Image (cartoon, rainbow, N blue to C red):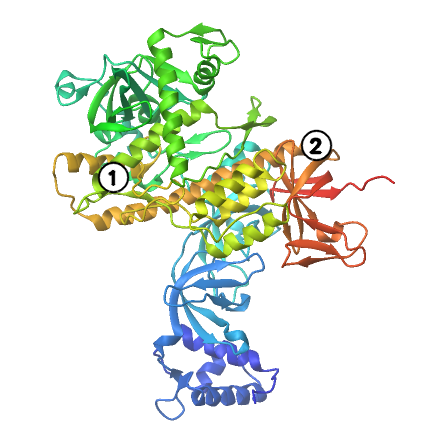
Amino acid sequence: MGRKKNKYRHIEKKMLSFFRENPGKEYNYKQIAAVLELRDTRGRNELIKFLNLNVASQQLKSPSRGKYTLAANKKQYYQGRLEVTSSGRGFVICDDLDNDIRIPKSGLNTAFDGDLVEVYCYKRKKKGVLEGEIATILERKKTEFVGILQVEKNYAFVLMRNSKMYTDFFIDKKQLTAAYNDGDKVLVRFDEWPKRAESPFGTLIKNFGPPGETSTEMHAILSDYGLPYQFPETVERAAAQIDQRITPEEIIKRRDFRDVLTFTIDPKTAKDFDDALSFKVLEDDLFEVGIHIADVSHYVQPGGVLDEEALSRATSVYLVDRVVPMLPEVLSNGVCSLRPHEEKYTFSAVFDITRKGRIKKEWFGKTVIYSDHRFAYEEAQDIIETKTAIVSEKNALSGESYSVDNATFNALLTLDEIAKNLRQDRMKKGAISFDRVEVNFNLKEDNTPESVYFKTSKDANKLIEEFMLLANKQVARFAGKREQPLPMVYRVHDEPDPDKLTNLQSVVAGFGYKFNLKTKNINQSINQLLADSHGKQEQNMIDTLTIRCMSKAEYTTNNIGHYGLAFDYYTHFTSPIRRYPDVMVHRLLQQHLEKTKVKSVELLEEASIYSSQQEQLATKAERDSIKFMQIKFMEHHIGHQFEGVISGVTERGIYVEIIENKCEGMVRIKDLPGDYFFYDDRRHCLVGERTNIIYQLGDLIQIKVEKADLIKRHLDFSIVQAEN
């Protein structure tokens, strides 16, 4: 028999929390009653009863008469990261346990999402679910938060808009200077959360300006993820002092490619060019192809100011209206950028390769190049498609038609042929092909969106992609494919989640797709599904669901191969201007070529883990910036009707992606017309209780835009009912 419900049960909870906050200390009941502010006789008597009951259950112990302390039971305490849900509850993920520990809102004890915590755990009888409460906050994941300032007469609050942040911040009135206005979007620093305070105390440290403005929101997004925007003065000074000369003394140490045909292919708007291709005919069916990468490691030395800043950022961040570079502009857009008609230091992977993509010889090392030409993707694509040396006016960077010489024309067509053979070989070996449509925006002068367009990968994009993949793969093989592998930072990708694949199978079956999970080669089944759905209205949704089945790619010194690319060895060598792991790979490769011993693999692994984390934050920031621009764009389409496809179904409603512009919004379940709907989790759909009307993934639907909320970054839709 369990204990009967007791209206004084909250006393027991507070009492145990107090002991857990003060392990190893002894207290008598009067001291505890004072802490819990129990002044009535009944409350004190209940406290004594709870003390004795918990001594009997071994939660507490009584080392001497009238004294109590927490029973030392290490098995009940675990460390892990806290994840807070939108409902305000939490879960602690512990390496020592198979299941996560569920934390009720009352047990969070001032911990925030992402904090490293120690949790006191007890097992509930119901279904064996683990439940606990936060005993100690070991490390705050972040101490700065973005919110909206709400000014009252004698104080203010910073209101949190993040669904995982369950509390707002109290601001003392002394901080309310003329620099801050009611309703501004601000950055607040967490200071403390006093024991009896309902909210944590914070300090205002930055004002981004009125919410909803593009500049305000972009700076707020960066700050929300702890991504720095400006470089410290010391870093800018160090970058300005770099010797940018190409000297004869340095050229002698390098393989000279300045007389070999070399060019870059990049987006029209690119300002940093970190890779170039060189091409030379050796025989009828043998070509020397050089993949030349900006030699950032020549300028950024280990342990220096520039290196420390590059590591702390770990990656460039690409928001819709701006790039936040990993390196100062003098490096990223200047000395390290492989600009046309300039000599540059590079680190290269050079291959003697056949038309079929068979490598006969490879070489890695430091080089010097001269870029003869800068192509935009559109220009290279024009040549590949038309099979002429003339670039049309509409695709030329200058806006005027021009022609390239025969050598460059032939080089482009041959490289395209080799790339297609390399890609075909990859696909045969099980590489997964995601040809996802990317959403882009044409921006006005004030950086507000004028229109939406879609970016797709064409032959010119794939040409560059295949040669970058080739260089990355062969550099990784050089270090790893030997009896005693050399230390290397790998880019790895684990196998997909089997449960998610099973779920995907059941979802796509509803659209009539066969997805075979019993085959040994799941990759082929995935590719077949992607090919079958290509160009269909549900393609983007199926691509998204399939990507969610995949593990996250990450950096590590422990190679497990790259599942998605079907490579046993893979690294990132080709973008050191915008990715710190590539800088590490350059240094490691040079050490291996010089047969120098690598000092600390442990430090490499730490930097790899950190780089993976920063990459994930940058990706989230980039997605947030796209979402903001979509909402900003849709502000001018309130009341307009669009055709959409149901892209998600939850118990709260349906998500609909507009086919015309890929903007996604929600129709809340309470706003679905004509019936009361309930969520069928087995079939992932909403079902009308009386009418049996079903809303499920992939359904075409007509919607009207009701609201565009820039603050919450949310679109509200309603369903347009067909007229009788």
- The numbered disc on residue 477 is 1
**Relative image position of residue 547 (x, y in whole percent):** 49, 44
Quarter containing the C terminus: top right
- Residue 233 falls in which quadrant of the image? top left
Residue drawn at x 54%, y 65% as measured from the top left: 105
The kind of secondary structure element at disc 2 is helix
Disc 1 marks which amino acid? Arg
- Camera-side residue: 224 or 545? 545
Q: Quick check: can you spot residue 303?
A: no
Disc on res. 538: none
- How many residues crowd mark 1 within 10 Å: few (<14), some (14–19), many (20+)? some
Task: Return the x and y of residue 396 as percentages of the image width and height.
Answer: 47, 12
For marks 1 and 2, give the one nearer the viewer.
Answer: 1
Specify the quadrant that holds the N terminus: bottom right
- Of all residues, the one furthest to the right in this rendering is 724
> Where, by quadrant of the figure, is residue 302 drawn?
top left
Which residue is drawn at the image coordinates 79% and 49% (left, top)? 673
Task: Left or right? Give the position of 360 relative to 172.
Answer: left
Q: Nearer the viewer, residue 316 or 445?
A: 316
Q: Which residue extends farthest bottom?
A: 65
How crowded pointer 2 is (Cα within 10 Å; few <14, some 14-19, many 20+) is rated as some
Q: Earlier in the sequence, mark 1 or mark 2?
A: 1
Instruction: Judge by depth and name the residue closer to the eye, 445 or 581.
Output: 581
Q: Compared to 468, does 283 lie above or below?
A: above
| Residue at the (16%, 44%) spot, across then down | 598
Q: Which mark is residue 637?
A: 2
Residue 559 image offset from top left, x and y in percent: 29, 48
Check disc 1 and report its element: helix, strand or loop: helix
